[in-house]
Image: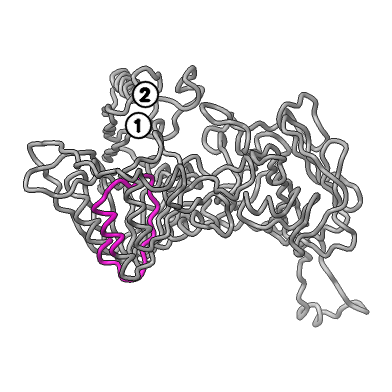
Amino acid sequence: MISHSAISFVRHSALLLVALMLAALLLIHSTPPTQAQALNDLYLPFVAAPAARVLIAAAHVDSVVSGEPDEAVLLWNAGARSQPLAGWQIGAATRHVTFPITATLSLEPGARLWCAAEDAAFAASFGEPAACAWEVAANPATLRLAGSLSLNNRGGQITLRDADGRLVDTLLYGNVDQGAPGWTGPAAQLYTRGAVGIEGQVYQRKLHPVLGEPLDTDAATDWASDLADVAWGRRVRRPGWLGWDAASMARPAHGDANATVTVATGPEGLYAPLAATLAAADSSIDLSLYVLEHPQLSEIIAEAASRGIKVRLLLEGGPPGGVSDLQRWCVRRLAAAGADVRYLAAASNAPPGYDARYRYTHAKFGIVDGRIALVGSENFTWDAMPVASSKPVGGRRGFYLITDAAPVVQALAAIYRQDWAPDRFLDLEPYAPQHPKYGDPPADYVLPPPPVYRVDAAPFAQPVTVQGQAHFIVASAPENALRPDDGLHALLARAGPGDEILLAQLYEHKYWGDKQSNPIADPNPRLQLLIDAARRGARVRLLLDSYFDDDDDPRSNRATADYLHALAAEEGLDMQ
């Protein structure tokens, strides 16, 4: 939370930078002009439009799918003219593939296209069609390239040449010591700090923060995994993610609206407003949840499905500890009422090695009737949302926002459309009663009693509702939550004297990366923003969880607290 005293939201607008170069003056006269003619003539500068500039913008070289049929190369025209691709070549090592000279495929200014080994496998991994393929082109609309190509997982170079054989662009990557024409310095590397592995990652260029175009200086610093760039580097991309450009969530969603916003606080104040919102649905309920272990809320949703409300529920397929029998009970009840329930996990019809798009679908949000959004920090569980009783009830602290703000509804609906896409991805396993992992609970399963956490008071049992004009931002991970120039990070970066930052987190690591690292080599960018704000004179309070903390981890919450207190004492900062 940031106090309203001095900080406000700012909409960021892209700036179009146009450079006009005077090349010649066109003087067209059959005879020397008279003085009168000269006064009436209009002389226009001849402006040469910038040429096409086609780049290798991304490469998927180490797939998790058996046989790697979805390896691919992304071409992006960052220039101002259309570029026909007939006769162009993509090369790797001693092999290359060629666009047929009869091909009519062109790359328009600002457009991008994928060329893949097999178009069907690529579409299943990336959720979009390949324009061309060099091994199998099953779709008649896919252009079949001549030749063969194999992208070395460990390292190599990928080249792009035009129809005259001139080198247009180079990507040098991985475990390569020697240089390459069209490239300067060491090869691009993938980000592998902490628990991040190489397999399945996509090499991608950084985008210009204002123009949204791929950077191009023919060096590893152009690429998003650049370790030296803490702000815009150290990034990971996997197949199926959005965020390639502004149209696909590269920036957080912004919008103004006259809206109603309800703030519900848990544990004591979450169940009633969420239950009321779900029970009032009259056409549809779309939910994306990490865990569903709440029989009462499940019953409300099931009743909605029974009366004809379209209900879709997306759940995480691999929560730590697995899917509980309590969740299986809840899902069985929903499915019996007609709800469509799916788990984010490699589906039974996926090829060997196929992986889900996200390590976890950790979201907790929903859209009701296409006009009400709910988004919060807590799972649908008894611990987080105890059913109200005559005595104060405890549990897990958390929050939900419930709003009819159109920008929020539209942004969350767009995320849901991307995630719930069984027609495009093979990582949505539908509920089936007999499924060994996602099926029904044992036949003799009996619901346990809800836990009881006795507390002396429950001061937040009633939600707070406000109405008025406001600016809304929806930041989403993995697409844009870490942008340094937008969303939460941009807001924190502007806090200074007279401002207050109150931040509650389940955890905030002292540093990112491996346990053996430190805050200098692998800073946690969000934590650093808090420290910098305190150094500018802001009052900073960070509340962290102890129950789930690992005191043996040097990056733990305890380590973070000790680190911040030491900094505050040494530098005289108002930070706790």
Q: Quadrant of residue 85?
A: bottom right
Residue 227 image offset from top left, x and y in percent: 59, 29
Residue sitting at x 7%, y 37%: 456
Cβ–Cβ under 8 Å for marks 1 and 2: yes
Residue sitting at x 65%, y 35%: 221
Along the horizontal axis of the image, is 80 left or right of 124?
right
Task: Name the residue beneath numbered marker 1.
Answer: 507
Tell me the SS state at disc 2.
loop
Q: Nearer the viewer, residue 117 or 263?
A: 117
Label 1 crowding class (10 Å Cα cut-off): few <14, some 14-19, many 20+? Answer: some
Task: Name the residue beneath numbered marker 2.
Answer: 556
Amino acid type, mark 1: Tyr
Judge whether 551 appears above or below 321 on screen: above
The quadrant of the picture occupied by the C terminus is top left
Between disc 1 and disc 2, whose residue precedes?
1
How far apart marks 1 and 2 lie (CA) works out to 8 Å
Q: Which residues are magenta?
A: 278-303
Amino acid type, mark 2: Ser
Along the horizontal axis of the image, is 276 left or right of 558?
left
Judge whether 98 appears above or below 156 on screen: below
Residue 480 image offset from top left, x and y in percent: 49, 47
